[in-house]
Image (spheres, coloured by chain):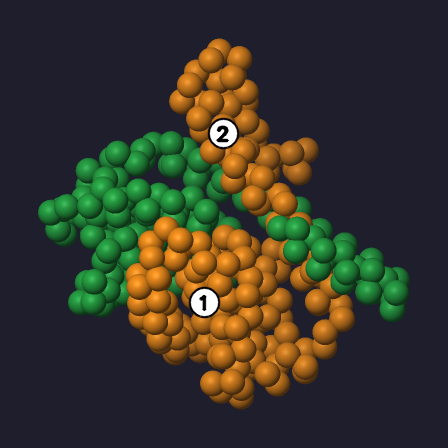
Chain colours: A green, B orange
Amino acid sequence: MLILSIITLCFIVLSLFFDYQKTVRGIKKGIKMFINLLPILLLMLALVSIVLFLIPNETLVRYMGEGSGVKGWITAAGVGSVALIPGFIAYPLCGILIKSGVAYSVIAVFITTLMMTGFITLPVEAKFFGWRTSIIRNLFSLVAALFIGLLMSLFL
Amino acid sequence: MKELKKYIFPLVFLTFVGLSYVFHFPSGKQIGLNFWMFFKEMILFLPLMFILIGLFDVWIPRERIEKHIGKESGWKGTGLVILLATLQAGPLYGAFPFAYILWKKGCSIRNIFIYLGAFSTIKIPMITFEIGFLGLKFSLLRTLITLPIFIMLGFIMEWYLKDKNFDVKQP
């Protein structure tokens, strides 16, 4: 975070040094895009907070734990696809799941869908890519995640 | 008024969280805490990202980028977008604005989706985190399996979208 702030500041100073007008135009443009996206971002974050609350860790362990078989895979892909959870929450959570006996292949599906697909994030994605492309990308990523899990199960 | 209308859902949500605190409703408080955690991450990182994108847009001419990651760039272009993605951090919604600017500067459809794939699954700051929680073997194996799969996904998306007027819009 600090690094990003420093980089941004350096670029702003550098840019100001070369061309004031251009710099102002660039920053204004960036801020405008952010403001336009803000309402839908807040909505998305609110939904993710609710989903995270509704699905406690114990439930995940129960559905994905030892001997859960196909049910475990479906839970991992399903829960993983609903929410887009950032890594700093996803990884500690997966650490807990592994210790509770969840298979590595199921974890691979869970992690991949958590980070690659998010049906709650769709409205944000659609602002950039349009609905059709966003839905297709998410569906393909879901299939890819299952495939990754399958391959992982061959090795671990 | 029209501006305010867009914020109706977030406002309703915040009112709910506020009331939960006033009336000591624990579930509402927990949801509020979750929201605060995500909000902090977003608000610290996204405005800076957008400022960088704005500057990138006014300074870097399209030709410069198109040559390296455009339609004719081949595997070198693919390698470059993967490298770019792995050095970044943050959740996937932070990659969408970057994908927009890459597209505007002439990046190919395939490389846009390979960029998104790499960004979401093999960012280096994340991998170090992953190794800590899930071990080197898991992390390495997952990366090696994931890499070719989302490169393939890039090809599939390009094939699917090539005559469908694909566009990345400015938000």
Identified by mark 1, the residue type is Ala
Q: Position of residue B13 (x, y in %)?
A: 51, 28
Q: Residue visible at 68% across and 82% down?
A: B63
Q: Residue visible at 52% across and 40% down?
A: B38
Q: Earlier in the sequence, mark 1 or mark 2?
A: 2
Residue B49 picture quarter: bottom right
Q: Which residue is mark 2?
A: B33
Q: Do the residues under discs 1 and 2 have CB atoms within 8 angstroms?
A: no
Q: Which residue is mark 1?
A: B118
Which chain is disc 2 placed on? Answer: B
Above or below, comparing residue B155 to residue B133 in the picture = below
Q: Position of residue B40 (x, y in %)?
A: 58, 39
- Rate crowding at label 1 as few (under 14), some (14 to 19) or many (20 or more) other CA atoms within 10 Å: many
Above or below, comparing residue B31 to residue B78 in the picture = above
Residue A29 picture quarter: bottom right
Which chain is disc 1 placed on? Answer: B
Could you say whether the residue bearing mark 2 is in a helix, strand or loop?
helix
The residues tagged by marks 1 and 2 sit, at their Cα atoms, a distance apart of 30 Å
Q: Can residue B36 be seen in this snapshot?
A: yes
Q: Residue visible at 76% across and 56% down?
A: A9
Q: Position of residue A152 (x, y in %)?
A: 24, 64
A17, B3: nearer the viewer:
A17
Q: Residue visible at 66% across and 51% down?
A: A2
Image quarter where the C terminus of chain A lies is bottom left
Could you say whether the residue bearing mark 1 is in a helix, strand or loop?
helix
B39, A90: nearer the viewer:
A90
- Rate crowding at label 2 as few (under 14), some (14 to 19) or many (20 or more) other CA atoms within 10 Å: some
Identified by mark 2, the residue type is Leu
Task: Work out which residue is located at the far top of the displayed protein and give it.
Answer: B23
